[in-house]
Amino acid sequence: MSLQAHEKFGDQVPYGDPSWYQGAPTPYYTASHVVFRAKMRAFVEKELKPYVDEWDEAGDYPEELREKAYKAGILGAIWPAEHGGTPPPDFDAFHDFIWMDELCRCGGGGILWAVFTGFGIALPPVLKHGTPEMRAKVARPVISGQKVMSLAISEPWVGSDVAGLQTTAVKSPDGKHYIVNGAKKWITGGMKASFFTVAVRTGGEGVNGISLILMEAGAKGFETRRMKTQGWWTSGTAYLDFDDVYVPVENLIGIENKGFQYIMHNFNHE
């Protein structure tokens, strides 16, 4: 397939569209990108745009949407095949951009964060710093849409001031668990999540005392409750309470007290 003008991708206004829409030569966009954009657009037009308003009003979406998106090659498109991802051939940063660009055409931020992008900020620390056992437990079920995963950093006391977070994780006397106490606020997708990447304070004040741990829904002392938000109703934004929640030390993501660095690295793409 040759890279040529595709009127359906733009308005054909001179200098108003990406040049490759109008057939101009480019060293970056290939036929693979053209095919991928067409696939993304077809899915958004058929499966998202007609329903986003209805889902927002209901504050929910059909559970089968995640599986449908995965089978269509959409949900797992930007993830490694070894973990169940379905990336297009020669996947690169431009496929990543096209993926987000086309999804945003649905006009519903809530459904995007609930299904497609919420775990995109929660899963990377596990893939990069988690143990093989942790990756095996979490990655494939989340990427394939069987499970939902959320990132839990912001708190009632701190939002963008990550270094000031106050939720604590103290080791139990036998050293086998972290005992977590505190709260998290504005946690996107939290009402449906089975897994949470949680930022906790395991050391002293500031950036050098923060760690990431993997927490599972249903743990004793761990409660989620829905927040009323001005928009993004489909996203299921949650408030999380931790009251002496025992988390196995094996659920530590990476190295203790190195969590701030992991978070900042993760924010680059987020």
Image (cartoon, helix red, strand yellow):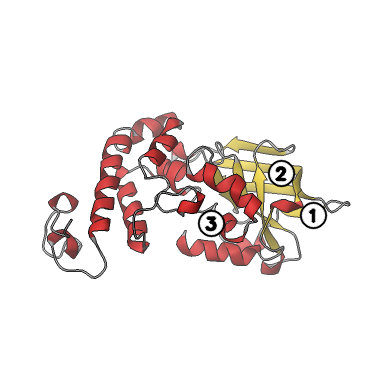
Query: What is the CA distance from the residue labelled 3 to the residue labelled 1?
Result: 24 Å
74 over 267 or under it: above or below: above
Residue 106 locus on image (x, y percent): 31, 43
Any mark on residue 225, and which? Answer: none
The mark total stands at 3
Image coordinates of residue 23 in percent, x first then y, are: 13, 62
Amino acid type assigned to the residue bearing label 3 in the image = Pro
Marks 2 and 3, Cα distance to the nearest angstrom? Answer: 23 Å
The amino acid beneath tag 2 is Phe
Residues packed near mark 2 inside 10 Å, few (<14), some (14 to 19) or many (20 plus): many
Looking at marks 2 and 1 on the same chain, the residue that comes earlier in the sequence is marked by 1
Query: For the residue labelled by badge 2, is the local secondary structure a helix, a strand or a loop?
Result: strand
Find numbered disc 3 in the image and state the secondary structure of the residue it sits on: helix
Residue ID at (51%, 62%): 267
Residue underneath mark 2:
242
Q: Where, quadrant-wise, is the N terminus in this rendering?
A: bottom left
Q: Secondary structure at mark 1?
A: strand
Image quadrant of residue 199? bottom right
Residue assigned mark 3: 124
Q: Amino acid at mark 1?
A: Val
Q: Is residue 156 left or right of residue 123?
A: right
Which residue does the numbered mark 1 point to in the structure image? 170
| Residue 58 % position (x, y) | 43, 29
